[in-house]
Amino acid sequence: MSHVNPRSVGKGQYLTLLGTFLVSSILSGVLLAGLVVPAAGVAGITVKAAPRVFDTLPTEFDILAPSEISTITSADGEVLAKFYAENRVIVGFDQISDNMKNAILAIEDKRFYEHKGIDPEGMARAAVHNLKSEGTQGGSTLTQQYVKNTLLETGLQKGDQDLIESATEQTISRKLREARYALALEQKMSKDDILLGYLNIAPFGTNVYGVEAASQLYFSHPAADLSVAESAVLAGVVKSPAAYDPIHHPEEAKERRNTVLGTMLAQKKITQEEYDEAVSLEIEDMLNVSNTTSGCAAAGNAAYFCDYVIASLMASEEFGKDEAERKQKLLRGGLTIRTTLDSKMQEYAYQAVTDRIPVDDPSGANTAIVSRDPKNGHILAMAQNTRYGLPTEDDPHATQTSFNVDKAHGGGDGFQGGSALKPFTLLQWFKEGHSAWERVGGHSPSFQAYEWNIPCSPGHAGNWTVGEAARREGSFSVLQATELSVNRAFAHMASQVNLCGIFEGMKALGITQPDGSMIEPYPAEIIGAGATPLTMAGAYGAFANHGVLCDPMSVISVADRNGEIINEFEPSCHQAVDEEAATKVAAVLRRNGDSAGYSNVRIGRPIIAKTGTTDKNDNLWLVGGTPQVMTAAWAGYGHASTTSVAYQTINGVYYGALYGGTFSGPMWAQYMRNAMADYPVESFDEGNLGSPPPPPEPPSPAPSDEGDGDDDD
């Protein structure tokens, strides 16, 4: 139905309009016997004037489906969170007990099944009172109340303040308008449908709407199971949802309940025995409260993932034309939002991060794990060792900041990547035609400005003295340098390639400055740049996926309240970096997974992996995974990322120096062993790293006539 703006009617016209009820009611088949209007009231009524004035009022209005709870689920159907502006669950007529139907009709509209939308007797009584007292006494039928609630709901859904005000204004005009609508509505809807609509839309307490949500809130069972006493409580609430709220005002609710029960008894809706039993119950003894929390706080250890989902939907043009429309759909649409989260993997991730550092550990240090499917970008798990919420005096460590993601999705700027960034130097190394068998290193720790090739920003060239966790002098093959994570060797590699290309590769794989621009190409940034665990998992996934990067994806589909799919999201993947170079990087990282230095992260199947530890042991990484699941594991201080986690007691154990491989590595491995249990074993494309160079030939014996001299290596 199309909405027509209400026409304001003054009190001067009310007597004329009242006469219209006679005409309209007769036309609607309403029996008017007993309608008494004071003589002064009928003095100005004419047969001709009344229909003309009444006909100027609209007869049609929008009947939108009432706002309903939207539900976010995991990929396997587990409910994560619910969102609503109004806590409401729509049910069918046969899903509401007869007790409830009888109670609401007894107290609100005993002639509901007899009238045609208005009750002339009640209207006349209210009209006389209102004309004398300037008031707006009731007299409204249940149909009229349904009209009022529907008009208000339409205004709320559309965000139209004029509609909201016109639906709630305390004026005679509103009463007449509702009556006109009610007469028209009864020509289009059955009585049962109107009753059902009312029971699904009416307020039954503070932000609880519809009888099903009310039954679940107050009694923790469906509306189909409402008893006589429970039905009387709910029927009593609608007169004043705040005043008769049984949770906060049990005595007032009891008095109102008993009024409803008395009315039901008088109308023979219940027996004396049922009445006696119901009135004997205390409200507190009847209640079994189950609050339905709106928002991500109800998602438990998946709350940070839930935040990511909401941020993604609020930015999605597929979900709505602008943020206002998207928010309305989420809060009022009764949607089912199916996400990519694997509920079992989420539990394994949370177990791993809290086993490593429990929530509220005295150290205050943090852990985080996030997994992505390299082939489609699905986020499979996202966990950290914190409680979701705003910090308070009682819970100072609570946070709504996700350590796994960027600011746009509820996180921060990421953490310094350390040696976990070295694969990006490898990527450029292979792209420029270098070999995994070349010898690198053998350089002093100090690199001079002139040694760098930075054509995109020559001014960024500068001296860099490379730090090292241990003395690693001499030269190494690239494979050895990667396994041993030799900083000096990677600095040497970086000095032999276009340094800009390293950072262009990072950007192509999602590792950027917070504004999305390329990281400033300073030499030290090859191991000092910042990244979020989510982007690191994505980048490593692209190495395993032949250079194809899939954007992170958190929502699979959105269904409407009828279960019809209205949005279906597809993976967004593209060739981000050179295929051959990326495959070679994966081959090097695959050899890492088999090496002695990575023995504590083996999970019984092929993996790629790289550790990372930053200066002062302040950010500890292990990034890697299988062809099906790529995972970044991080430890540090989420809100103070340059604070060292070393030389202190963590989870009851005193640690000296800490490293990604020895601290985050076992956490990563614990999670991955469990997470991969249901996946088949898959191998990586090994890539073509070529053959190692032949060992140097042994020196030939010196001719006898040259004597026995020493070799001069």
Image (tube, helix red, strand yellow):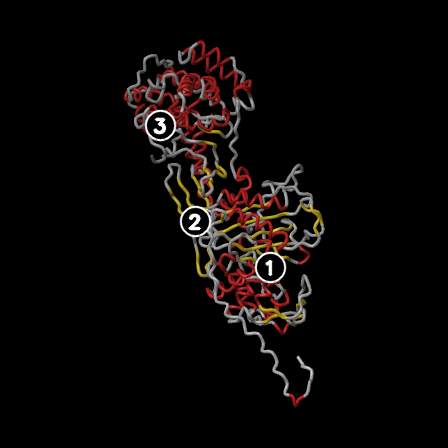
Distance from the alpha carbon under mark 1 to that under mark 3: 80 Å
69 lies above or below 567: above
Which of the two residues, 219 or 332, is positioned nearer the viewer here?
Answer: 219
User: Which amino acid type is shown beneath numbered disc 3?
Assistant: Tyr
Reading the image, the residue beneath label 1 is 596
| Mark 3 residue crowding within 10 angstroms, few (<14) / some (14–19) / many (20+) | many
Extreme bottom residue here?
705
Q: Is residue 596 above or below residue 478?
A: above
Residue 453 figure quarter: bottom right
Label of residue 157 in the image: none
Q: Position of residue 341 (x, y in %)?
A: 48, 45
Q: Which residue is mark 3?
A: 181
Compare marks 1 and 2 and give the one earlier in the sequence: 2
User: Dot 2: within a 10 Å radius of its alpha carbon, few (fewer than 14), some, or many (20 or more) residues?
Assistant: few
- The numbered mark, 1 or 3, whose residue comes first in the sequence reads 3
Question: Looking at numbered disc 2 in the image, what kind of residue is underneath it?
Answer: Glu
Between the C-alphas of marks 2 and 3, the distance is 37 Å
Residue type at mark 1: give it. Ala
Position of residue 135 measured from the top left corner of the image (x, y, whole percent): 46, 21
Q: CA distance from mark 1 to mark 2?
A: 49 Å
Which of the two discs, 2 and 3, labels the residue nearer the N terminus?
A: 3
The image shows residue 67, relative to residue 661, as above or below, that is: above
Of residue 699 and residue 412, the one placed in the foreground of this image is 699
- Give above or below for 472 relative to 390: below
Identity of the residue furthest to the front in this view:
704
Q: Which residue is mark 2?
A: 317
* SS category of the residue bearing label 1: helix
Based on the displayed image, in which of its 4 quarters is residue 389 positioned? top right
Q: Which residue is found at the position 41% from the left and 33% from the top?
A: 66
1 vs 3, front mark: 1
Q: Residue furthest top?
A: 272
